[in-house]
Image: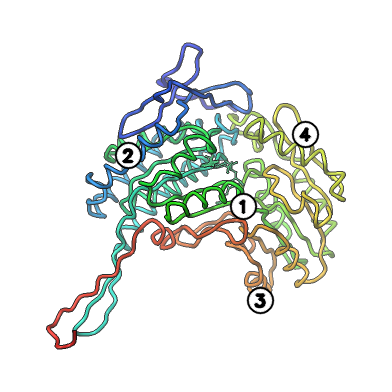
Amino acid sequence: MSTLQTTASEPTTESGLVEFGHIIDGREVQSASGDVFTSIDPYTREPWAVFPLGGSAEADLAVAAARRAFDEGPWPRMSATERRTLLHRFADLIELHGEELAMADTRDMGKPITQSLSNDVSRTALNFRFFADHAHGSSAEVLPMGTPHHAYTRFDPAGVVVAIAPWNFPMMLESWKVAPALAWGNTVVLKPAEDSPASATIMARLALEAGIPPGVFNVVHGYGADSVGEALTANADVDRITFTGESSTGKVIARAAASNLIPVSLELGGKGANVVFADADLDNAIAWSIKAIYTNAGQVCLAGSRIYVERPIYDEFLRRFVEAAESMRLGDPKDPATQIGPMASDVHYEKVRGYVETIPESGGEQITGGLDEGWFVRPTVIREPAADSPHQREEIFGPVVTVTPFDTEPEAVALVNDSPYGLNAMVFTEDLSKAHRVSAAVVVGTVWVNCFFVRDLRAPFGGAKQSGVGREGGNFSREFFTEPKAVIMQIERSNTH
Ligand code: NAD
């Protein structure tokens, strides 16, 4: 099959690199210092694009632009209907430029193009459409008090939002933050991950084309610690920080937010548990379990990386799971036939390599998989590692899964909960009562029963324990991205004072 090409109109340097800028106050600009960094295509392991390297100067400029746009500009003062119209126009443009956006993420971090196109572009557009409509439909709540008083809750925009994103679903996770922030009338400074910066600039260009005013959606590029990311979180003109990334980074961000006493939303790491009971529909359980760990080469916070299988079906599950894993096609992520691309960067490949090379020390057995050429890791299965091994407890963030038997329902629940993380779990069973009991007993933010990845954007999304603080989605996003205000009125004269 043919591979998609990037658009011909991209500005490129003499060396053929595609050029991107920060988007600050409606203009695409370079850093004052002139410093730049490149993004490496993890398949070719060559740079493909160049970005300005931001620092505290760019962080301050972007926050100042967002502050002005919030304090003086039209965006927070528009009606929810006007904002909804512009956000839908933005979503239209995202769909129209879907191939360009998808190719940007695929070249930045190696995600198979079919996933970038079919999943990430459509979810990105949907995020803007959903929150545009949700904010429009939920702008106030009336609280009937009875005469002589009348009360209502306003959901006023909170102000300037800093959004800091990881590299594994670049545009999709960025839009999960930017869309609700904009829909409720805030202005935004987005810092994409340094390994996947391109789609953020493209989105901000499209936002301007859609008519979203300058300064409302700003993008700055650069690193996190001691760089533009840290400068953004320290800026006292910021009203909210929404962060997705590693749990250890989340703690640093939370401290920065605490020093300015502003709310912070943290969507952090995971070690998803996947429980397959003996009465499960095995075809369905295997299909979802494969998808849960190998989509995006396992670089998914929700990845079902610990599978627990009830003993009577353990051997059959393992045999069929391994067969399916071995049939997956590794290759050029730009090729629509590819199912598994390379690890996103050399640094990340080294991390995953460390786990693969130490499987013998985990107490488990490697049934299939292992390292491949370049930054590729084949779908890897570890049978029964020790419960306290790093392979069972830590987030590997690669195509590496552990498979362990269990005997009873309480044991399965205890195994799921024996983790520092609490992002999500899956339960495969045909027994409805068991599905409800287990869903109630596991300490996680999301439980999927007989499926995976299915989302309703009104539902809370977030993690327990080390997997996060707070929830986003639907009204949960509204609580975070607004400053709810009670208005209590006396509508009849009364002698009570
Ligand atoms: P990371 O924490 O290394 O980086 C995330 C972002 O934070 C990047 O933009 C980075 O530049 C920035 N950053 C780093 N240090 C910073 C600092 N001191 N101040 C400000 N910004 C800073 O995470 P990553 O490697 O990009 O992403 C992978 C992690 O994200 C995994 O742990 C994964 O589970 C998690 N994740 C969670 C969810 C979720 O919804 N819970 C979704 C996707 C990814």
Mark linked to residue 64: 2
At mark 1, the secondary structure is loop
Q: Which residue is mark 1?
A: 302
Could you say where residue 12 lies in the image, as x and y percent from the top left? 44, 17
- Quadrant of residue 462 within the rendered picture: bottom right
Type of residue at label 2? Ala
The residue most toward the bottom is 495
Please name whichever residue, 164 or 263, is drawn nearer the observer in this view of the structure.
263
Residue bearing the label numbered 3: 433
Q: Secondary structure at mark 3?
A: helix
Up-down relation of residue 381 to residue 452 (above or below):
above
> Who's the residue at 56% across and 56% down the image?
468
Q: Is mark 3 within 8 Å of ligand 1?
A: no
Residue position for label 4: 371
Height in image: 93 above or below 284?
above
Q: Is residue 110 left or right of residue 64?
A: right
In the rendered structure, are the residues bearing label 2 and label 3 in contact, judged by CB atoms less than 8 Å apart? no
Mark 2 to mark 4 CA distance (whole Å): 47 Å
Q: In the rendered structure, which amino acid carries the disc numbered 4?
A: Leu
Q: Badges 2 and 4: C-beta atoms under 8 Å apart?
A: no
Q: For the residue with label 1, is its CB less than 8 Å from the closest atom of ligand 1?
A: yes
Q: Earlier in the sequence, mark 1 or mark 3?
A: 1
Mark 2 CB within 8 Å of ligand 1: no
Distance from label 3 to label 4 (Cα)?
A: 42 Å
| 151 to the left or right of 314 | left
Q: Quadrant of the C terminus?
A: bottom left
Q: CA distance from mark 1 to mark 3?
A: 25 Å
